[in-house]
Amino acid sequence: MSRLAKHRAPDPQDEFATEVTLTRVAKMLTGLGYETVAEFDRLVISGHDYVATVWISFSAPLALVIDGQRRVPAPFEQASTLAHFLDTWNHDRIAPTASYHMLDTGDLLIRLRSATFIKFGLTDDQLASALTGALNSMNTFSTEYRVHFLANDEDESLPETIKRAQDTEALRGPHPSTRHLPPDEELPVFGAPDPVEISGDEPLDEFEFSHVVEPLDQLDFRYSIADEDIVTTAVNGLGFALCVDSDTFFRVTGVYPTTLDPTHDFLSVWLACNEHNEEAVFTTAYTRVENDTLLLQVETACDISQGMALDQRSHFVVSSLVGILSGMDTVCLQACGYSIIDWPQ
């Protein structure tokens, strides 16, 4: 029998989710103390160490995306060390997803990306939490990067003229959705934009553990629950783990134990993860070593600190499962030479 979480009746004082637009996001950012400049398809925030771009991905699943780009590239000589640093960050941190792009000069441009599903809208509290969480995490990344790669007295400050040029390029240059493509290449269109579906009367519930398994019950999936409240299941031949992290995030992770050598094969596997992270909107690929086995992991996460409505929870899990399967298929093919996903015939 399916076990559905208790769903409370709407309260007259409930705040319901509403559509997320860039106009609404800009107003929220201003209220949070951030200065933005806007074009019709993006907002730009000028930071000290990075420039951030906020935009909406209309491909399914509809998502609010916050991209960050470090102002000063890393030298190519740091490539291997940086790969381990970024992989560790993606393993240890919920967001943003960190990746690098090799410039024509051979230097490495570090890029960050956070995304929040918005098909079923967000409340003001959910939106504020998503924005502050993403931007604060960018600052945390900058701090940790400085500790690992810069001497105590090394100053990365750029002249204001260069910062303004970078900000203008972020505002009027190629759209960030095409960041993984060669210059002048456009993003292919595979279908109509993912439509917004706002119920208008779906109340938020304070997130509880039963909400982790609720979508699996709806899908009639088999699963088991470990002592640490980690839910495990399998879809199309891939093992999944679902859990609540620090009472703040709901994480869904796909895990594949490779037969590759954790030391000698790390860089080739990480490069496959990096290529995925450069392109993906809401999934993160990284490695982990357990008992001398190199694990390949692709995961998603969402902020649950402000609660979630039933439709938001179900949409997150279904979209995560589909996105992780697709991501693992791509990364595994590139890193291992084969796919472990058992796609239906």
Image (cartoon, rainbow, N blue to C red):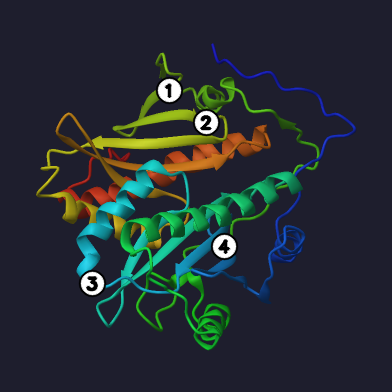
Circle 4/circle 1 CB separation < 8 Å: no
Residue on which disc 3 sits: 76
Relative to residue 209, is residue 289 depicted above or below? below
Circle 3/circle 1 CB separation < 8 Å: no
Q: Earlier in the sequence, mark 4 or mark 1?
A: 4
Secondary-structure class at tag 1: loop
Quick one: 185 or 287, which is closer to the camera? 287
**Amino acid residing under circle 4:** Ala
Q: Is residue 126 visible?
A: yes
Q: Residue 192 carries which label?
A: 4
Quick one: 48 or 343, which is closer to the camera? 48
Within 10 Å of disc 3 (Cα), the crowding (few <14, some 14-19, many 20+) is some
Q: Earlier in the sequence, mark 4 or mark 3?
A: 3
Q: Marks 3 and 1: which is nearer the front?
A: 3
Mark 2 and mark 1: Cα distance apart in space: 13 Å
Residue on which disc 2 sits: 246
Residue on which disc 1 sits: 230
Residue drawn 42% across and 71% down?
179
